[in-house]
Image (cartoon, rainbow, N blue to C red):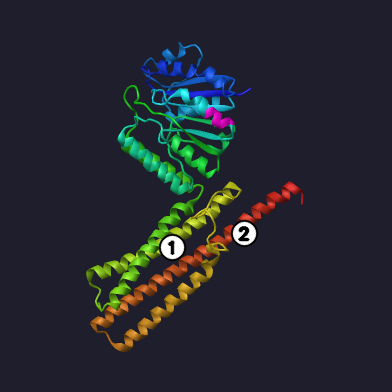
Amino acid sequence: MTTLSIVIPAYNEEDGIAEIAQRVLAVRDDLRQVNVDDLELIVVDDGSQDETAVIANSITGVRLIRHKQNKGYGGALKTGFGQARGELIGFLDADGTYPPEYFPQLCEAALNGAELVIGSRRAGAKSEMPVTRRIGNLFFANLLSLIGRQRVSDSASGMRVFRRDILSRIYPLPDGLNLTPVMSTRAVHEQINMVEVPIPYSERLGRSKLSVIHDGRLFLQSMIWTALTYNPVRILGLIGAAAVVLAGLIGVGLVVARLSGVTELGAWGVTAVFTALVSIVSGISLFALGVTFNYMVTIFHKRPIRQGLFGKPVFKTPLNHHFGWMGGAALIGGIILGLGSLIVGIGTGTGAEGIQRLWLYLLVAAMSTLVGVQLIIYWILLRVLEELGQREAITERDLETGN
């Protein structure tokens, strides 16, 4: 026997709660057609100051849970999740924007193997979503697809069905409106089987509680921080790689300019040099930091998780294994270049052109030396983390086998 528990978070929704509750209860017969035998409807009144709770409590078939104080959209949903008795748990908003008539389709996908089914407002069905929200949802969906390497068309949809047993894998979840994008981000990195079902979207009843700027910033922050707890190098590494590429392009431009007969850097040339040096040092630092955090995340989760900059190894051996000799080469090269430039500069005098070349070479030498020191430090740190990870794995395996 399969039961679907549907949770509706409600805060000052007296104008729409009765209609949406009746529409949810009306899908009971359709649910039976897809082998869902029972329906439980939970309305969580999140400290409403109007008649929301009174109206919901008067509807036969509604189980009302009340918060004395407002805990937020996510807080209300989590209360409902904790009280639900169904093997399948669904939720939608109380404002009438999402169609409960599509719950049978979402449940059918869940019973056919999906662990999390998202009602997608951007998968082809008719949508009355405002333009600002449509742009925001497009941005966040593409952001999740980028950092998670899995295509998701509607990362913030507020209509979903999921199996109860995935709760331990997607928690913790926030108390605010950012619960849905965080759930999507965690599901992607936990390799939860997600399926999207196209649904229509309607204009809400009453005034929207969503602030485009405030909640958009909250969505962005929560998605990035959540992704960083799983695959830091995916974000830090991409930023670092972009900085290194920028430095490389500037370097190529300077070489081309020199071959073209330009002998003086000028204001723009000096700015370009400093930009390149800052970019390459910062880029390598961010990339190495991302790799280091990935090792820490793996140790914390005590299992291999979906990690990596591109999703699959680029080299036969991990790049961090080469940090030692790469750092040593950069360090030695920087010292040699610095000493050589100083010796040549002293021997050739201190003319204007000589001084310009001297500080440029010394600057490059300093950059190479700093990069070398950074790589060596991260190489040592990563070797320690790798040893700790192997020790943890061996200890757990010995405990399981008794050896």
- In this rendering, which labeled residue sits more in front, label 2 or label 1? 1
Amino acid type at circle 2 is Glu
What type is the residue that disc 1 sits on? Ile
Residue 253 position, x and y percent, is 31, 70
| Farthest bottom residue in view | 347
110 within the magenta span: yes
Q: Is residue 41 above or below residue 276?
A: above
Residue at horizontal 39 percent and vertical 70 percent from the top: 367
Residue density around tag 2, few if under 14, some if 14–19, many if 20 or more, within 10 Å = few
State which quadrant residue 248 falls in.
bottom left
Can you identify the residue that label 1 sits on?
A: 284
Q: Secondary structure at mark 1?
A: helix
Q: Is residue 75 left or right of residue 359?
A: right
Q: Which mark is residue 94?
A: none
Q: Which residues are magenta?
A: 106-111
Q: Is label 2 in a helix, a strand or a loop? A: helix
Quadrant into which the N terminus falls: top right
The residue where tag 2 is placed is 387
Prevailing SS of the magenta stretch: helix
- Seen at 57% across and 36% down, the residue is 168
> Residue 402: x and y, percent?
77, 48
| Residue 265 picture location, percent across and down | 25, 73
Is 95 located above or below residue 347 in the figure? above
